[in-house]
Image (cartoon, helix red, strand yellow):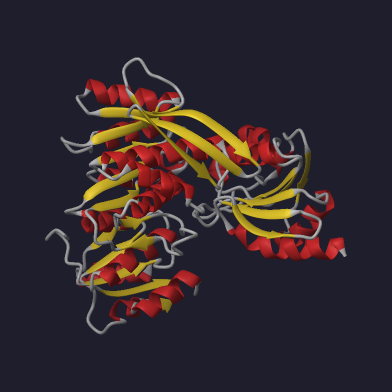
Amino acid sequence: MVSDAVDLSRVHLIGIGGAGMSGVARILLDRGSIVTGSDVKDSRPVRALRTQGAQIAVGHDARNLTLAGDPPTVVVTSFAAIPKDNPELVAAAELGIPVIRRSDLLGELMEGYTQMLFAGTHGKTSTTSMAVVALQAAGQDPSFAIGGQLNRAGTNAHHGSGSVFVAEADESDASLLRYKPDIAVITNIEPDHLDYFGDEASYFQVFDDFADRVTDTGTLVVCLDDEATAQCGERALDRGINVVGYGTVTHPRIPNHARVTSERMEDTTTFVTVDLNGTPFEYSLAIPGRHMVLNSAAALLAGDIAGANPVKLAEGLSGFTGVRRRFEFRGELPSGTRVYDDYAHHPTEVAAVLSAAKAAHDRVVVCFQPHLYSRTVNFAQEFADALSLADAAVVLDIFGARETPVEGVDSRVITDKMSIEAIYDPDFSHAPLSVVKVTHPGDVVITMGAGSVTMLADPLLAALAEAEQ
């Protein structure tokens, strides 16, 4: 199934423990490749890959290229996350070993399959995961690579026996342009990653370019509820691409093949009806929120286009239990206080999660960690407005990730603009005590962000439990 363009017999992955890298490493191992890699720390994904046969070093060193004896036939890296002076990259260049991006590798792995790709500013991981679970319920065994771990399957990637390969298409560094989708889904488009693209126009353009990558016999699927995405679909229509839509609304030019006709919430379960090509299908969702309803309609339509049984697809959606760090339940206290963890790191995502939580619960407290200095500064007011949907908030210092700290910039650019009780706590280890101060019995508490804030869920549960004694 792999093209002759890249020799994948011995593959070395730098940053192998990351969500994307660990997934493609798992597929390579399943296909019989010799896999080596390195990461800055030991982790659950690293240990899992070792049990599958990967040889992995903690720390970066040129000698890691020969962990399996012979040097690798190709080295895989993330240009955004791995610096150019990484000793393994330098050694690969000196030895003349090809270096490719993770997206290039994924493109190679998808050759020969029906490629189902999910793109968009928000919702890629959840929608991709829903599609995988739905296809599995329909008797298919799709290969997949997603950016999060499926709760039910306990994995983020799989080498399947079926003809469909399901994956996320990441726009953050334009790597989605590496793929040739037969079914391309765009969930929404909103300015982000301006540190890479420079301006909003360039960011929007990458989705038009992605639409142009759809095969001649393929289909572009767009969310009609999102104006920018619908406009992208219209432009694609004008260029001769086959375009269909999904969502709650109709469109004058793009047919809505998966129209959400009703949604009803009971406790934390949402009951959904979707008119799929004129036939109603009902299912329930365990993950709350209008955004999840739209994501499920996208997954249902994509699976239908791929030829799967829609009745079984709907049953699969009812059995979808979520993805790690997407409104993931972490624990409940005797008082009824519940703690969840979520990956939301853009104002629209924050607002969607908090709105869904507020729809089902009286009081919501959020412990938020901003991600990237550039995003925090660019969207400070939007973050303040979104976080103010909660009843109280504790905001940690900015998680810089790939960016260096900016002098004079901290999370107070957000908290100073908020309209609710908001505590700025720069002390990570003290944050659980700050959350305890603003939490009432029976509240829903959400740790939120794309950085290290997920590590606070367990200490927060412990601090809340101690406060209740």
| Residue lying at the far left of the rendered structure | 4
Judged left or right of residue 125, residue 215 is left
**Residue 351 visible in image:** no
Q: Position of residue 124 (x, y in %)?
A: 42, 45
Residue 389 occupies which quadrant of the picture? top right
Residue found 27% across the figure and 39% down from its top: 305
**Residue 223 visible in image:** yes
| Residue lying at the far top of the rendered structure | 252
Q: Position of residue 297 (x, y in %)?
A: 42, 36
Residue 467 occupies which quadrant of the picture? bottom right
Q: Is residue 251 above or below residue 2?
A: above
Residue found 35% across the figure and 28% down from its top: 245
Q: Position of residue 196 (x, y in %)?
A: 41, 42
Q: Is residue 44 above or below residue 132?
A: below
Residue found 20% across the figure and 67% down from its top: 8
Q: Position of residue 380 (x, y in %)?
A: 63, 36
Q: Nearer the viewer, residue 293 or 37?
A: 293
Judged left or right of residue 445, residue 108 is left
Image label count: 0
Quadrant containing the N terminus in the rendered view? bottom left
Q: Is residue 299 above or below residue 102?
A: above
Quadrant containing the C terminus in the rendered view? bottom right
